[in-house]
Amino acid sequence: MEIRLFKREDATETAQVIAETLKKSNNKDYCAKYIDDNIASHSADVLIERAKEGHMYVVCDKTRIIGCGAIAGYWGSTTESILLTIFVLPEYQRKGIGKQIIRTLEQDEYFLRANRIEIPASITAVEFYRKMGYEYKNGIKELDEEQVYRLEKFR
């Protein structure tokens, strides 16, 4: 397995990884419309733009992209950052790849410069992120209007 920075030519395959993961892993927690909307908001073009705003990484098993994750400034802040677009193909889940993605993001300059890091966590992934040291933002354990939990970690 190799984790490396996302390149423009990775966009289509990365979007497919996200779509497959959403359809197979998140379908027990979210309705079809939510999943379809989320897939649309993670198109190849969107990923290319997101990568310009921060650092996006892909996980490769030989030449196949099997996961991804991104970090950027939180609304342009230099003291706060946000983790985004963290996905691992279902057949590669529970093998430590998600942890490797988080560890990579936590070594990135956007993480190291931040006092606070936020992550919008799906119902599906909230407990994984909590095991990685992220806690409910302001102690609020409720889904927000985007149907995610807001978690945070302080450095």
Image: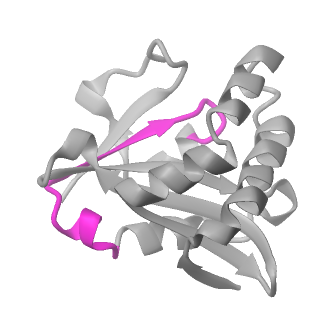
> Magenta span has 109?
yes
Quadrant (top left, top right, bottom left, bottom right) of the N terminus: bottom right
Against 9, residue 39 (above or below) is above
Taking the spot 70% from the left edge, 32% from the top edge, the residue there is 40
Residue 35: percent from left, percent from top: 75, 26
Residue 32: percent from left, percent from top: 82, 19
Left or right: residue 5 versus residue 138 is right
Taking the spot 72% from the left edge, 78% from the top edge, the residue there is 60
Against 67, residue 78 (above or below) is above
- Going by the picture, which residue comes out furthest to the top? 145
Taking the spot 48% from the left edge, 17% from the top edge, the residue there is 143
Taking the spot 87% from the left edge, 61% from the top edge, the residue there is 91
Against 37, residue 114 (above or below) is below
> Magenta span has 14?
no
Left or right: residue 28 versus residue 44 is right
- Looking at the image, which is closer to me, 135 or 113? 113
Residue 26: percent from left, percent from top: 75, 34
- Looking at the image, which is closer to me, 100 or 75? 75
Please count the marks in the image.
0
Q: Is residue 3 visible?
A: yes
Q: Which residues are magenta?
A: 107-125
Please identify the quarter of the rendering in which residue 124 is found: top right
- Colour approach in the figure: one colour
Q: Is residue 132 visible?
A: no
Against 91, residue 21 (above or below) is above
Please identify the quarter of the rendering in which residue 135 is found: top left
Residue 52: percent from left, percent from top: 41, 58
